Image (cartoon, helix red, strand yellow):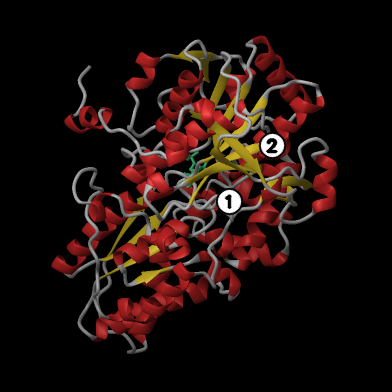
Amino acid sequence: MDISVLQKARYAYRPGLPAILTAPISSIGVEAGNETEAVDDQTALRKRFEHTYGKPVVRFVPGGNTITERPRQVGVVLSGGQAPGGHNVIAGLFDALKKANADSRLFGFLGGPQGILDDDAIEITGVYVDEFRNTGGFDIIGSGRTKIESDDQFTKALDVCRSRALDALVVIGGDDSNTNAALLAEYFISRGAEISVVGVPKTIDGDLKNDQIEVSFGFDTATKTYAELIGNIERDANSAKKYWHFIKLMGRSASHICLECALQTHPNIAVVSEEVEAHRKTLGEVVDEIVSVIVQRAENGDNFGVVLVPEGLIEFIPEMKTLISELNRLLAEHTAYYASLHTFEDQSEWINKNLSRDSSYVFSSLPNNIQRQLLMDRDPHGNVQVSRIETEKLLIEMCEDRLAELKSEGKYSGRFSSQSHFLGYEGRCAFPSNFDADYCYSLGYNAFLLSAFGLTGYISSIRRLSRPASEWEAGGCPLTMMMNMEQRHGALKPVIRKALVDLEGAPFRMFARHRQEWAINTRYHYPGAIQYYGPDEVCNLPTATLRLEHS
Ligand code: FBP
């Protein structure tokens, strides 16, 4: 195989594990805490999860009751968007399974949850997994966004797991996929099946976190990859001194990626969606704030700068949020009729007629390309595909209009030339940083132990991540503990609560303390590329967000 020098070198990397997980498997025991409660809507959730609600948080410790080392069959599925480190989760799972019993077998469902429904799987062998160790991507078995939600799908999933004689199913995914894992766990028990379902917290977005999950895997590598590119763009901006760069950053909903990148690169402006929503800022006000920095910098002769825009911004602007929820409802309730409208003109005319007066006004005031993007298909979980909405270009257009007005009023005399960028897919399949390589391997190894102890409806949890890997704590958290009820497709559904940026949290406060200085003076910070070899502080430093939240 023709592989890069780095890929070859990474095959030899031995990921770090929490000390407890390096012990012989037969010497590891489990310690359970008290019963737990969901974050909200406890009564409804207790009823919905009759068999799995309220279980204790568990931690692996030396000795006590240990697992029997009989051969086991485990299935694994990757769900949702790619995140660096997914291959190592599977490698950790494989190694633990084989360490417990060499006759155990691991099956990977292909192409995401649809692979379960189609019973499309391969056996993951030692030779096969070795090709993927410490590499980025999900190509080991592929991923997909199918949601298992109908009764028929649950029955099918159980039939497939039974026919393959699985002892456990490991679901590697974000909040929606782990919600699915919780529902599957409940369904399996309710049908008398002793098949553990264990989740693993994945998403570059960083919004699957809480007291037990300090960070989802992939966030570390993806933000470091984007920060390298932003730093490079900043240096270019500061060298040429002629462009304003508007950089949209992935992260469907929360602004964790944007905030982390701001902490790493000190841009002139970073918009944080959660702040926009908290202060109920209109799109016009967001634009005015950006324009005010452009004008002030122009007064100092600096007609250049860098603006970070979170991908999910559009859904946090109150008037846009209302518009999107009206659009979601219209498109869900009139799917067939809407599909019969073939031209954009017909579609937008029908939409405009059926929106409330305010939303119709907002919709009509948007440029045509943004209107089209807002009408594109929703993903299987009902989310607007924000990665396809060109918010960065919308902001540029609006800034240009506002600056032209100011110029005509004699209040601005600078030059505004812009470049737009979208950083998203560039970071999702990077070689995992040492942090993600270690964390993912530990999560996978740990997921096996949870399943082998017969725990179901749990998510793999590795904590104390700001310390060296050997000091990490390993255990599991019941998925119901992270849930509440939310409106989805017009009905109340149990879902894992997304963690948005906390405006009182240390990362945001750190940003807020410095942003004025970064806006006007040029204080760019260049983190450079991820380093895999070299001094500890260069190769193994976790994200600023993790350090600020947990050190
Ligand atoms: P997950 O939540 O599934 O991890 O995906 C996150 C994400 O990368 C978002 O940041 C982005 O909006 C979305 O996936 C893009 O989805 P797609 O890969 O389907 O274009």
366 or 519: nearer the viewer:
519
Name the quarter where the N terminus is drawn: top left
Furthest residue toward front: 63
Q: Nearer the viewer, mark 2 or mark 1?
A: 1
* Residue at x 51%, y 56% (from the top left corner): 312
Q: Position of residue 388 (x, y in %)?
A: 47, 47
Image mark for residue 212: 1
* Residue at x 83%, y 38% (from the top left corner): 50
Q: Secondary structure at mark 1?
A: loop
Amino acid of disc 2? Ala
Above or below, 225 against 233 in this view is above
Observer able to see residue 36? yes
Q: Residues within 10 Å of mark 1 (few under 14, many from 20)?
A: some
Q: Position of residue 237 (x, y in %)?
A: 20, 65
* Residue at x 58%, y 59% (from the top left corner): 315
Lower sequence index among marks 2 and 1: 2
* Residue at x 24%, y 69% (from the top left corner): 524
Amino acid of disc 1? Gln
User: What residue would you read off at disc 2?
Assistant: 182
Above or below, 10 against 325 in this view is above
Marks 2 and 1 in Cβ contact (< 8 Å): no
Position of residue 183 in the picture relative to residue 206 (left or right) = right
Q: Position of residue 20 (x, y in %)?
A: 47, 39
Observer able to see residue 145? no
